[in-house]
Amino acid sequence: MKKMIIACVAGLLAALCFAQQNTKNAAFNDVCVSISAHKVTKGSFTQTKLIKKISREIKSSGTFIVSVDDGVLWNTQKPFASSMAITKNGIVQTAANGKKSVVSAGSNATFEQVSSLMTSLFNGDAGELEKNFEIEFIGSTANWNVNLVPRDASIKSFIAQIEMAGRATIDSMTLHEPSGDFTKYEFTNQSFTDSLTESEKAGFNAQ
């Protein structure tokens, strides 16, 4: 469940700048508004997970989709094929053989809270974000960094701090855990469309 909640938080932050914002930080608001013009964002990702205790890095890569209407879809291609869709209703995992498993948002209190935050972002309720995270914006719309610290203790028990960096798009996102472990996502080859294809929609479908 911990892995799923961290993945959900990653999806939440990946969606952060793809929803209309109205924050107290004008520069942060400008960055998010410029990116939020796109209903669907697609691209490639590389994930690096550092396990501090054994000094080991685990890498994976694939493609991602952020849809304002549908949620966030991670399609992992290496080292093993799988997908994980994060929606307002829960998480849909699809194995390489096509078998799906679903975790409802209501099955875990922390996940339900994170999922609620994501829904607020998709609906443009940036006030919910500011209520749940301390936000530090550094830089300008041309080259920026954002640090977020969860206010809620239940989320903070999984994620101590989140760092994001980008320019016209989000280039990287790092989730720091209280243990010292971290997961870093690097995003490349980003493109934008107004809608999903039928096969892309199927990735979000629990059936």
Image: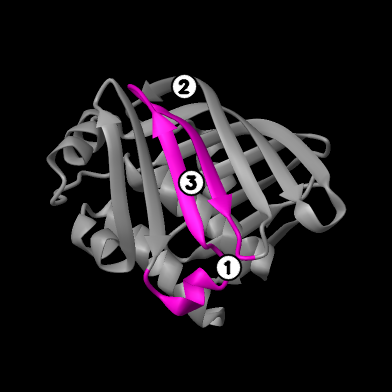
Q: Position of residue 188 (x, y in %)?
A: 53, 22
Residue 164 lies in quadrant: top left
Secondary element at tag 2: strand
Residue 27 percent across, percent down from the top left? 17, 35
Residue beneath label 3, please? 72
Nearest to N terminus: mark 1 or mark 3 = 3
- Is 125 on the left or on the right of 136, as rendered? left
- The image quadrant that residue 168 belongs to is top left
Q: Which residues are magenta?
A: 151-178
Residue at (52%, 65%) from the top-left corner?
A: 90
Amino acid type at circle 1 is: Phe
CA separation in Å, label 1 and label 3: 20 Å
Residue pictured at 42% horizontal, 33% vertical: 165
Q: Position of residue 182 (x, y in %)?
A: 64, 50
Q: Label 2 belongs to which residue?
A: 190
C-alpha span from label 2 to label 1 = 28 Å
> Is residue 166 at all visible to an observer of this figure?
yes
Residue 181 vertical placement versus 15 (above, below): below
Q: Nearer the viewer, residue 119 or 132?
A: 132
Viewer-closest of 26 and 110? 26
Please name the residue that numbered disc 1 is placed on: 158
Against 76, residue 22 (above or below) is: below
Crowd tier of the residue under label 1, counting other residues whose Cα lies within 10 Å: few below 14, some 14–19, many 20 or above: many
Element assignment for label 3: strand
Q: Who is closer to the viewer here, 205 or 1?
A: 1
